[in-house]
């Protein structure tokens, strides 16, 4: 499977999602001077949920039906990715340059991959593991005190200096858990999942913000925050759910790790943030790691066990059931046993052992 193969829905969805989310980081940083961190997290998610609700209403899209177990997976994902993560990110952004924060967000891809391997048994090859190690090295470099190596080794770093980077990495951990939980319901309408997560997280964070004494910002600031939220959180999340469906959590996270570079470039070019030696070296390490991830080509002979499930699909090599429909459609269908070899990702049809 080539990197720019035509029709690769999962890959292009992940990259588009990464671009929108990456651009949102420096924009959110710019809004922190006008809106408190907790309130900004609420406005970002409220904007994403309301924007997608308007879209779904205008298209008269039906509400998907989830089982009890699937509802619990989605609820857990909302708490992790919509409750804890954005607040931690906003607090981290308040104490660190947006360009550095953008690259630190690469930790999300690494943690997503680790959880996918440890909890959900997705296969990791040496190429993926090496790429993760390079991304971690870049993240650690960005989290090092600004005074440099001698200050860090001498113990001169204070908690105040380390907390912003630690908060962002912790946000990445919650988003990584969110990604793996959302994978469990990725077959459901992506815009509906993103809408539910946005509305739930937005209302919850806004309520907490006001309980802590926050007040409404100016109308332009509120509108700007909700617009950024709709694009960087709502549309981006819907695209990422599509990527999860086609790629699995670890590979979708790998492609999504291009997002921080978008944020870093915008921060330097449009907000005149300095290009430090840490930023340059971390960019090189993380860029190498991302390249290893997105150029992976995993192919081998494998067996498909019988499977019955419901999701949107077209009649490709994995969907040859008996009815005439050449377009994309959704219904319950059965997969018969199948043995073949081709390049693939750990999506819903490729959960085999290695």
Image: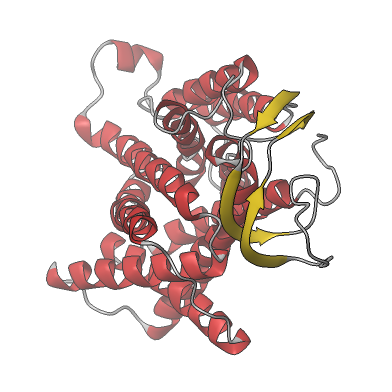
55 and 16: which one is in front? 55
Residue 266 shows in the view: no
Residue at 52% from the left image edge and 76% from the top image edge: 52
Query: Left or right: where does residue 3 sit relative to residue 353?
Result: right
State how many labels appear.
0
- Image coordinates of residue 77 in percent, x first then y, are 36, 53
The residue sitting at 13% across, 71% down in the picture is 211
Q: Quadrant of the C terminus?
A: top right
Where does residue 317 sit, x and y in percent of width and height?
80, 45
Judge by depth and name the residue closer to the eye, 52 or 167. 52
- Is residue 305 shown above or below 24? above
Residue shown at the point (36%, 38%) measured from the top left = 173
Percent across and percent down for residue 338 are 73, 35
Q: Residue 182 appears at what percent x and percent y?
A: 45, 51
Specify the quadrant that holds the N terminus.
top right
Image height check: is 104 above or below 48? above
**Is any part of residue 119 visible from this angle?**
yes
| Image position of 266 (left or right of 317) | left
The coloring applied to the image is secondary structure
């Amino acid at each position: 499977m080539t990197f720019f193969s035509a029709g690769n829905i999962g890959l292009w969805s992940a990259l588009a999602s990464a671009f929108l989310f990456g651009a949102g980081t420096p924009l959110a940083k710019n809004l922190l001077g006008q809106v408190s961190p907790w309130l900004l997290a609420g406005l970002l998610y409220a904007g994403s949920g309301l924007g997608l609700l308007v879209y779904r209403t205008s298209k008269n899209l039906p509400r998907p039906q989830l089982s009890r177990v699937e509802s619990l997976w989605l609820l857990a994902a909302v708490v992790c990715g919509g409750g804890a993560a954005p607040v931690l990110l906003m607090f981290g952004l308040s104490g660190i340059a947006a360009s550095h924060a953008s690259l630190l967000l690469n930790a999300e891809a690494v943690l997503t991959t680790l959880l996918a391997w440890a909890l959900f048994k997705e296969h990791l090859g040496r190429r993926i593991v090496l790429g993760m190690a390079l991304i971690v090295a870049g993240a650690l470099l960005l989290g090092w005190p600004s005074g440099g190596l001698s200050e860090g080794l001498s113990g001169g770093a204070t908690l105040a200096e380390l907390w912003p980077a630690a908060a962002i990495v912790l946000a990445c951990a919650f988003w990584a858990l969110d990604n793996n939980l959302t994978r469990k319901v990725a077959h459901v309408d992506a815009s509906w999942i993103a809408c539910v997560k946005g509305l739930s997280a937005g209302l919850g964070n806004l309520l907490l913000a006001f309980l802590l004494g926050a007040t409404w910002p100016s109308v332009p600031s509120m509108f700007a925050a909700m617009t950024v939220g709709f694009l960087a959180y709502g549309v981006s999340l819907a695209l990422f759910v599509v990527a999860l469906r086609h790629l699995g959590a670890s590979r979708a996270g790998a492609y999504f790790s291009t997002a921080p570079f978008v944020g870093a470039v915008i921060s330097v070019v449009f907000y005149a943030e300095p290009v430090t030696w840490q930023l340059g070296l971390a960019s090189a390490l993380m860029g190498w790691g991302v390249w290893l991830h997105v150029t992976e080509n995993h192919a081998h002979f494998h067996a498909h066990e019988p499977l019955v499930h419901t999701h949107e699909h077209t009649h490709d090599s994995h969907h040859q059931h008996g009815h005439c429909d050449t377009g994309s459609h959704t219904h319950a269908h059965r997969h018969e046993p199948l043995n073949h070899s081709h390049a693939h990702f750990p999506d819903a049809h490729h959960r085999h052992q290695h």
